[in-house]
Amino acid sequence: MCDSCGCDLPTDHDHNHEHAPEIIKVHQSLLAANDAIAAENKAHFEAMGIVAINMISSPGSGKTTLLEKTIERLKGKIRIGVIEGDIETDRDAQRIRAKGVPVVQMTTGGACHLDAAQIHKGLHLLEKEPGGDKLDLLFIENVGNLVCPATFDLGEHQRVVLVSVPEGPDKPAKYPKAFISSQIFVITKIDLLPYFDFPVAEAKADALHLNPRLQVMALSATSGEGFEAWIDYLEAVMR
Amino acid sequence: MHEMSLVQALLAQLATLAAEHNKKRVITVTLDIGPLSGVVIDSFQFGFDILSAENSLTREAKLIIINPPATYQCIRCGHRQSSLVRPDHCPECDETLLIPEGGDGIILNQVEME
Ligand SMILES: Nc1nc2c(ncn2[C@@H]2O[C@H](COP(=O)(O)OP(=O)(O)OP(=O)(O)O)[C@@H](O)[C@H]2O)c(=O)[nH]1
Ligand SMILES: [Mg+2]
């Protein structure tokens, strides 16, 4: 047996062959492949003059409803497109299509988040929809989940995290990553404040404690209260 | 369970490295997973145990996970502290708004292969 590398070849061979144990320094993120595609997506958005917004929340916080109201409000002024992410069904895409803007549904088939490669694919599909090749604003509605989507950069310009009043004010403290990685925190369904114990100031303070740069707003898509601040925000990011 | 997706990304990187270096078996894999990465280490280990058993390259591989601290900078006085858990306040000026820096990495640091 060879004393240098423990193989059973005669001793006078090159020890650089395949089974010599070797430590290889890598220092590469597991997200490197995702992030490379995210960077391509971002370059694509910029070349097309698109502002992309990634929306993250638990299931049912009101992402699609907010998009419906936003489209109603801005249609004709701003060219909006939507990429919908869900585990199953194209129900959200149907709701958006009914508002008359280009939309594609990406179903993840079990995965709990969208990744950059799905957005790349979604963009090409969206370009085939009527009007989908000329957009000012692209909303990406992520899979309803406050945990997993926060880890995956999609190449978006802005990340919005939403929490609805019935979910309770402790969500920033319990699910920090989504709040640390977002630029804006929207508290939704504030028409329900009379029925739930949701101290808005407390939720806001917890979120700012995690991420002092976070912009916070509270609104109701159904009553319209607070909605103007959201529209102002969208107009500001498009400038 | 986005940890499964991350384990798949790890296994893809290991396969590429093994091909590049002409190796057949992974002995140890060392990862840095920061406290703000959003990764549940037990879930990651669980996913790795299941998926690594599916091929001969990684079947016997041992996973070593290092959990480096994040740095928190005080928004008022700029004092920096390093911690695994989020500090409640700045030890210098008591400010509660602290900006995290780093600590969100999920890094394949080194691989021992033969
Ligand atoms: N009271 C009230 N209900 C709302 C509001 N916004 C949405 N809802 C309701 O909340 C429910 C969920 O809304 P969606 O917009 O489908 O929520 P979502 O976040 O898109 O849900 P997923 O895509 O499944 O994660 C629906 O029944 C909406 O009518 C609001 O501002 N006030
Ligand atoms: Mg929805």
Image (cartoon, coloured by chain):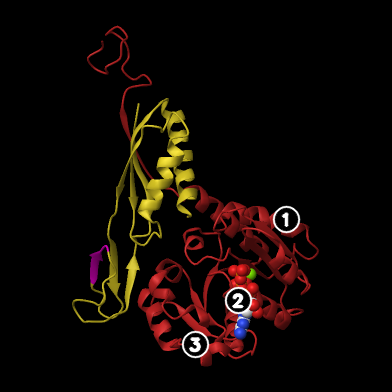
In magenta, the rendered stretch is B80-84
- A227 w.r.t. B82: above or below: below
Within 10 Å of disc 1 (Cα), the crowding (few <14, some 14-19, many 20+) is some
Disc number at residue A62?
2
Q: Which chain is yellow?
A: B
Q: Is residue B32 left or right of residue A204?
A: left
Ligand 1 contact, mark 2 (Cβ < 8 Å):
yes
Answer with the quadrant where ligand 2 appears in the image: bottom right
Q: CA distance from mark 1 to mark 2?
A: 25 Å
Q: Which chain is red?
A: A
Closest to the camera, between mark 3 and mark 2, is 3
Q: Is residue A191 above or below residue A51?
A: below
In the image, residue B55 sits, relative to residue A167, either above or below, namely above
Residue at the limit of the structure toward the bottom, as seen here = A194
Relative to the observer, which residue lies in front, A233 or B12? B12
> Which callout, 3 or 1, points to the residue nearer the camera?
3
Inspect the image, locate mark 3, and give the three-letter code of the amino acid beneath it. Answer: Phe
Q: Of helix, strand and loop, which one carries label 1?
A: helix
Q: CA distance from mark 3 to mark 1?
A: 41 Å
Respond whether the residues carrying marks 3 and 2 are from the same subunit: yes
The answer to whether residue A201 of the structure is visible from this angle is: yes
Q: Is residue A66 visible?
A: no
Tell me the CA gap for discs 3 and 2: 16 Å
Label 1 is found on which chain of the structure? A
Mark 3 touches mark 2? (CB < 8 Å): no
Q: Are marks 3 and 1 on the same chain?
A: yes
